[in-house]
Image: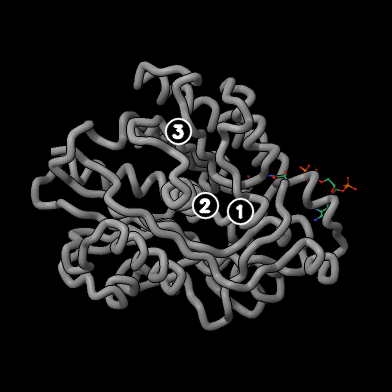
Amino acid sequence: MSIKILGIGAYVPEKVLTNFDLEKMVETSDEWIKTRTGIEERRIATPEQATSDLAYEAAVKALKAADIKAEELDVIIVGSITVDQVFPSTACILQRKLGAKNAFCFDLEAACSGLLYSMEVANSLLQGNPKYKKILVIGAEKLSSVVDWEDRSTCVLFGDGAGALVMGKTGAPGGDCIVASSLGSDGHYTDILQIVAGGSRTPASAATVANKQHYISMAGSEVFKCAVTAMVHSCKKVMKEAGITAQDVRWLVPHQANYRILRAVAGRLGIPEDEVYMNVNRYGNTSAASIGLCLDEIARGNLAEKGDYILLTAFGGGLTWGSILLKW
Ligand code: UT7
């Protein structure tokens, strides 16, 4: 028995918000956004769509690709910082929509590292307990609902979307899909990337709304530096653990935060730019969704061959980070 990715699916909302649209909303320019971030456009959900709706669309596609029914799922894990509501979990809401009545369901909050953390947990459940055979893992975000559309330093960065993977045990040869992994967190940096209000420390009030404390706040350049260091370090750890070098990696798939970050990480690892998967220009930073969106494009476009090494790496609020080496 080996643990494989049985199916991948992704969804982005139809509405496209371009840099030129943003020029009409805040004091910015297409040129600034493109040169500082690489982003040209991003997708924005409708007011009626919640994160679970985005996750549902991605999940249906992943289940179809895996050729399994929702009832066969043993676990659903949703990585998100934009859950539908504080509770019940978005995973439970999604379970109802899918009819995945045999699954136990929970959300996992690790910001932009949400998909990688969820994959690690799913892999451990599959490895450690014979009763778990098929797990749906999703990174889904409606970041447009937590962005201050008057703050040019953040509103140009984020977008909405969802990426889903079905992980499960199969009789297929070739070993497990996760060859090595390394995850980390550092709670000393909780205040450089956060949403301050809405939790138990600062519950929602008229004052928190007036002070815009329900929106993402970020110390951009500090986050930038930490992101590069942490991703490079964890990628190196994972390659060492697997006994491979940068030359063996077919694709580096980093969390799509900013193309300058991605290039810096790739440069320090010695991975050529044309082997770094990037779609940040089309979707912006979709937090936990971004790596799933990339993997879906790689799968649908047949951009990797069986046995290729794909190195996933992410970084986000917490701080959280991690890298996972996949054998495709
Ligand atoms: O998902 C994981 C978490 N997030 C990230 O990884 C994001 C990490 N950080 C970044 O990507 C970058 O730090 C940013 C893209 C957010 C900012 O780029 P930067 O090169 O670090 O710019 P900056 O924050 O140092 O700002 C430079 C200037 C400032 O003006 P002054 O003070 O030099 O006059 C900003 O006010 O750019 C100004 N600025 C803008 N100008 C036009 C900030 N945002 C904008 C904007 N349009 N949208």
Q: Given the image, on which type of amino acid does mark 2 rest?
A: Ser
Q: Given the image, on which type of amino acid does mark 3 rest?
A: Leu
Q: Given the image, on which type of amino acid does mark 1 rest?
A: Asn
Judge from the rendering whether residue 295 lies leftward or rightward of residue 315; answer left or right.
Answer: left
Beta carbon of the mark 3 residue lies under 8 A of ligand 1: no
154, 217: nearer the viewer: 154
Reading the image, the residue beneath label 2 is 290
| Residue 86 shows in the view | no
In the picture, the disc for residue 311 is 3
Q: Earlier in the sequence, mark 2 or mark 1?
A: 1
274, 105: nearer the viewer: 274
148, 244: nearer the viewer: 244
| Image point (79%, 69%), residue name | 21
| Image point (44%, 45%), residue name | 302
Reading the image, the residue beneath label 1 is 285
Q: Secondary structure at mark 3?
A: strand
On the rendered image, what quadrant is the N terminus found in? top left
Q: Residues within 10 Å of mark 1 (few under 14, many from 20)?
A: many
x and y, in percent, of residue 300 in the image: 44, 52
Beta carbon of the mark 2 residue lies under 8 A of ligand 1: no
The colour scheme used here is: one colour
x and y, in percent, of residue 70 in the image: 23, 68
Judge from the rendering whether residue 78 lies leftward or rightward of residue 16; answer left or right.
Answer: left
| Image point (37%, 72%), residue name | 87
Beta carbon of the mark 1 residue lies under 8 A of ligand 1: yes
